[in-house]
């Protein structure tokens, strides 16, 4: 997700899919249904323009819409920035069909019991359309600026593990109790419950094979991989998740697997070349050819479709475009919806 800092006005993509059944070594994976979404940064001057893009995207047929969870801009710290979980219920009221969420919620920003109440409220207001994205937090400068503790990665993942248990307990138990190292509940009469049963689908974002992927295996319905991977590297990460799931006798073959990456759909080759140059500078040691293969970029729909198919073959089932700066590239989003998405429906 750090890569989203420098791309500015480029259109971006990421991914997700469906829940996993009981573990069975002989299970044959069903053909995946491919979904498409947009993530809008809300560190922007105009909320009206953001709201309009959500409404446009719903009309174009996108499946999901997302915010990120940051309280300051990257690179321009004095720029406007809003709170994702305060904005999300307003966006729920401005849309009617599309599924929505925060990709991903920083667990360090809010106590999980408070977050559970906020999320349930959004799920009720949206009539059961909430996607629950969760992560351990990564932007250290942001935490330090606001005086929010930023412990080691090991502790952040341990806190996330407990937070997910707290969320599930509140959403499913008549009277929730929990006693962990970081969080506690004592006879919580959590009402009302979320309309989605047993609770809103949980997406965990990250790539770490030692701590994050085991958390995905234990707690998540869906997994979100950040930008910066070629299809071959995506397949390696998907294989690592399969192994983590097998450790607890869970079949992840039908789990939603999302990839966040950049889309440049333009008739101007110069825009694509510029994006590749930026990526090559960011990914030190990566060739321009490999840098281009971490994104979705092309001048024609057929070129874009071929790239989407490569990531689908690697295990990705949902592509989510990220709009970072205003004015948004509505034409790229619209063209993708009309010229590419129908081939995967």
Image (cartoon, grey):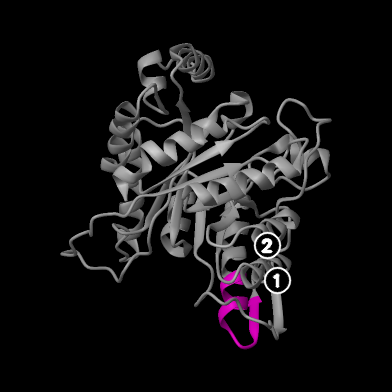
Is residue 25 at least partly visible in the picture? yes
Residue 174 counted in the magenta span: yes
| Image location (x, y in percent) of residue 241 | 36, 51
How packed mark 1 is, by other alpha carbons closer than 10 Å (few <14, some 14-19, many 20 or more), is some
Q: Is residue 94 found left or right of 316 in the rendered image?
A: right
Residue at position x 47%, y 53% in the image = 63
Tags 1 and 2 touching, CB below 8 Å = no
| Image location (x, y in percent) of residue 129 | 55, 65
Which sits in the foreground, 201 or 205? 201
Give the vertical position of 88 relative to 334 (above or below): below
Which sits in the foreground, 164 or 30? 30
Query: Marks 1/2: CA distance?
Result: 18 Å
Residue at position x 59%, y 71% in the image = 127
Which sits in the foreground, 328 or 225? 328
Q: Which residue is mark 1?
A: 117
How packed mark 2 is, by other alpha carbons closer than 10 Å (few <14, some 14-19, many 20 or more), is few
What segment is highlighted magenta in the picture?
Answer: 166-178
Q: Element under label 2?
A: helix
Outermost residue toward the left? 26
Residue 267 counted in the magenta span: no
Q: Is residue 106 found left or right of 294 in the rendered image?
A: right
Give the vertical position of 243 relative to 302 (above or below): below
| Image location (x, y in percent) of residue 215 | 48, 57
The residue mark sitting in front, 1 or 2, is: 2
The label number, if any, that marks residue 327 in the structure image: none
Residue at position x 46%, y 61% in the image = 220
Q: Element under label 1?
A: helix
Outermost residue toward the bottom? 174
The label number, if any, that marks residue 93 in the structure image: 2
Q: Earlier in the sequence, mark 1 or mark 2?
A: 2
| Image location (x, y in percent) of residue 40 | 62, 42
């Amino acid at each position: 997700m750090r890569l989203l800092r420098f791309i500015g006005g480029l259109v971006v993509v990421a991914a997700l899919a469906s829940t996993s059944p009981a573990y069975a070594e002989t299970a044959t994976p069903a053909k995946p249904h491919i979904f498409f979404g947009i993530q809008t940064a809300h560190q922007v001057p105009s909320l009206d323009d953001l709201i309009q893009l959500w409404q446009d995207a719903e009309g174009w047929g996108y499946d999901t819409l997302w915010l990120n969870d940051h309280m300051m801009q990257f690179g321009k710290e004095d720029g406007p920035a809003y709170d994702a979980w305060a904005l999300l219920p307003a966006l729920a009221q401005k849309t009617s069909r599309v599924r929505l969420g925060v990709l991903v919620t920083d667990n360090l920003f809010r106590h999980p019991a408070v977050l559970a109440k906020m999320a349930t409220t959004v799920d009720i207001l949206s009539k059961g359309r909430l996607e629950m994205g969760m992560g351990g937090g990564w932007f250290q400068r942001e935490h330090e600026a606001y005086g929010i503790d930023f412990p080691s990665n090991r502790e952040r993942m341990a806190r996330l593990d407990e937070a997910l248990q707290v969320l599930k307990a509140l959403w499913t138990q008549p009277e929730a109790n929990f006693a962990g190292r970081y969080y506690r509940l004592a006879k919580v009469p959590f009402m009302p419950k979320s309309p989605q049963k047993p609770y809103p689908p949980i997406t965990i974002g990250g790539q770490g094979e030692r701590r994050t992927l085991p958390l995905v295996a234990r707690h998540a319905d869906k997994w979100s991989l950040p930008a910066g991977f070629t299809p071959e590297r995506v397949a390696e990460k998907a294989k690592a998740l399969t192994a983590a799931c097998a450790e607890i006798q869970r079949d992840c073959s039908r789990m939603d697997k999302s990839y966040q990456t950049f889309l440049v759909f333009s008739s101007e080759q110069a825009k694509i070349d510029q994006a590749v140059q930026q990526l090559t500078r960011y990914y030190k040691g990566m060739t321009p050819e490999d840098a281009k293969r971490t994104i979705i970029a092309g001048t024609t729909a057929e070129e874009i479709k071929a790239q989407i198919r490569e990531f689908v073959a690697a295990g990705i089932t949902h592509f989510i475009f990220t709009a970072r700066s205003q004015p948004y590239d509505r034409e790229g989003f619209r063209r993708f919806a009309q010229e590419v998405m129908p081939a995967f429906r």
